[in-house]
Image (cartoon, rainbow, N blue to C red):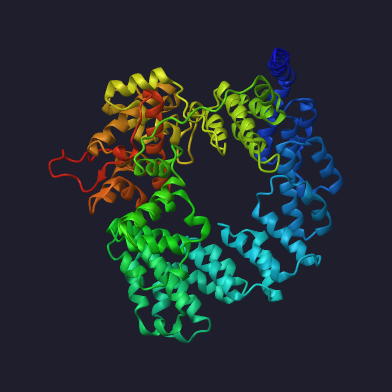
Amino acid sequence: MRGMRRLGLRLIMAVLLAPAAAWSQGGGGGDAALLDMRDAFRRNNTTQLANLLPTVRGHALEPMAVYWDMRARLESTGPTEIRAALDRMAGTYWEDRLRNDWLLQLGKARDWSIFEAELPRYRMNDDRQVRCYALMRDVATGRTPGEVVAPLVQANWHAQREAEDGCATAAQALLASGDLKPHVIWQRARLAMDANRPRVASQAVAMLDADLATLVDSIANDPVKYLDEKITAIRPRTKELVTLAIIRLAFSDPAAAALEMDRTRWKTQLTQEERSWVWGVIGKRSAQKLQPDALAWFANGSDRFMHDDHLAWKARAGMRAGAWGHVRDAVAAMSEAQKNEPAWVYWKARAVQALKLPDPATASAEANALLESIASSRDFYEQLALEALGRPITQPPAPPPLTAEETAAAQANPGLRRALIAMRLGLRSEGVREWNYTVGLHTPGGMGERELLAAADLACQHELWDRCINTSLRTPAAQDHAQRFPTPHRAQVASRATEIGLDPAYVYGLIRQESRFVTEARSGVGAAGLMQVMPATARWTARKIGLTDFKPGQIADRDTNILIGTAYLKFALDDFQGSLPLAAAAYNAGPSRSRQWRNGPVLPGDIWTENIPFEETRDYVKRVLANTTNYAALISGQPQSLRARLGLVGPRPETAQAINTELP
């Protein structure tokens, strides 16, 4: 054993010395040239890229530079030169990134011979367009019959959010051969119209008839006009287009869509499947508006014809109304994948408990078995399951310490080292992509559990808290809460929170969700820093707490960000009478929305949270509250309750202080 320890120590020392060599090798002009190449790539300046490329030869990030140079001229370069570039990047994320781009180009050009040669070397295998091109190749080369490929293309195509070429082209080819049926095209159009993506709906319908696609555009712009036209009922393909029109109308006015569905001419034209699907959309839109009519509208359709998203909203409307039979039925009709998600396992258990069928003892046993299957401290519903079984939320046992060899292997991993160098150079997005690829995609199935723990530890040591957390979250069994719930800036966060009467665990739970402790984080809408404070919110809060000399640029400063972010959170918490879920929702979506969503019946916090209309905010509140509970267990060392933090949510009490109408 002593010999093994000496070997491990030698490995660690060797690896610890290696980054210095890499830095010296990649420093000076090489670093500057790389940053210049990044800027040239963004401008698509192929001449500057070609001129700079020789100056980074031997740099640790040379593969990134080779990618930029080749990607900028990929469409005009021949296979021999592309393969030479791939060889220069062998084994890196950038090799696989370029191969992904090339495969898309080859598929679009139907160059199946080169596509076939390159596809087995593609390691990420996470691009739906490449998958669809591969399925097209299989049919074109006679490898797989079209009827076998059709359902695979359908699944990939329907899952795509945008009107991209690969799966759409595969669907078009299979439609022409008769292997894909027209109803699949209309299903794609329905899903797109329901998701407020009319361009995607038009692309799908154009496969059947270009003139119909033009009509879909007009339906998206004014569904009422289309439905009211006297000739609509006698037009060809009326029922499919009417279905799209009512779906579009339901987006803004579910009540008006319901009235349309009650018109005799549509009742007779639409099939049961079409009627059920449309009633699912109407019920969903009504449930998202927290309207009491939602369940009645869902009841007009058959669960077996509704989409998973519609069934999720039927279950939410059911739990909000205390109609547990609807919750049970909606979960039962979901796809196997969705009904096995922790959220729906939990709500099925709650429905079984409430209905007590066929008898209380049997129902209790069934519910407990469901809860046991998900109970842990991992996340929101797993924590609620623990409490429903009568067990508190505590820190799980830490995994065995990393060995010297495991630590050394992570430090020596070429992909992780490149990622670290990139992030230290300010190439954060590029470094994050290399890191994610290395831990999750470089080898089939990604790194093993111990490798992930070692990689997470490496990120923690470098204070890359987002990579530390996200890498540790990938471990299938072990839960290292020191990695998953780090407490950087503890003196600043804890002292500030305590000073203004906030629970430090709540502040940490929110920061973990907002920025993963990346101090320079900036969102697409301008939110900045650890607590992702918006500029207008920062100015308002600064005035309120007396920061008279505040300048907008200061929000990127760590201490100023914590000062202003915690002050705003305290203002929100006070305005919502100390309700953690309401304040978290207000922090994410704005206080006016949180005030609107609290109206209606008084609900347990878990039911109220599940009924938040915005998916982003619903997920945000769940994660902030689950984070808070885990941080409280970590900081205090005592058992915790998520349910107590959720509390009850309902209309503003009459005795509450006046609404803070200034709160942005």
Q: Nearer the viewer, residue 488 or 359?
A: 359
100 horizontally vs 596: left or right: right
Q: x%, y% of residue 542?
A: 32, 27
Query: Which residue is farthest right?
Result: 80
Q: x%, y% of residue 216?
A: 51, 71
Vertical relation: 194 (above or below) 492: below
Q: Residue at x 49, y 26 (%)?
A: 482
Query: Which residue is farthest bottom?
Result: 234
Instruction: Answer whether residue 289 is visible to the viewer in this image.
Output: no
Query: Which residue is farthest front?
Result: 361
430 horizontally vs 242: left or right: right
Vertical relation: 577 (above or below) 155: above
Query: Which residue is farthest left?
Result: 655
Vertical relation: 67 (above or below) 517: below
Q: Residue at x 39, y 59 (%)?
A: 313
Quarter of the image containing the C terminus? top left
Q: x%, y% of residue 132?
A: 69, 59
Give the image quarter of residue 385. top left
Instruction: Answer whether residue 131 is visible to the viewer in this image.
Output: yes
Q: x%, y% of residue 179?
A: 68, 73
Quarter of the image containing the N terminus? top right
Q: Nearer the viewer, residue 346 or 338?
A: 346
Give the image quarter of residue 262. bottom left
118 horizontally vs 94: left or right: right
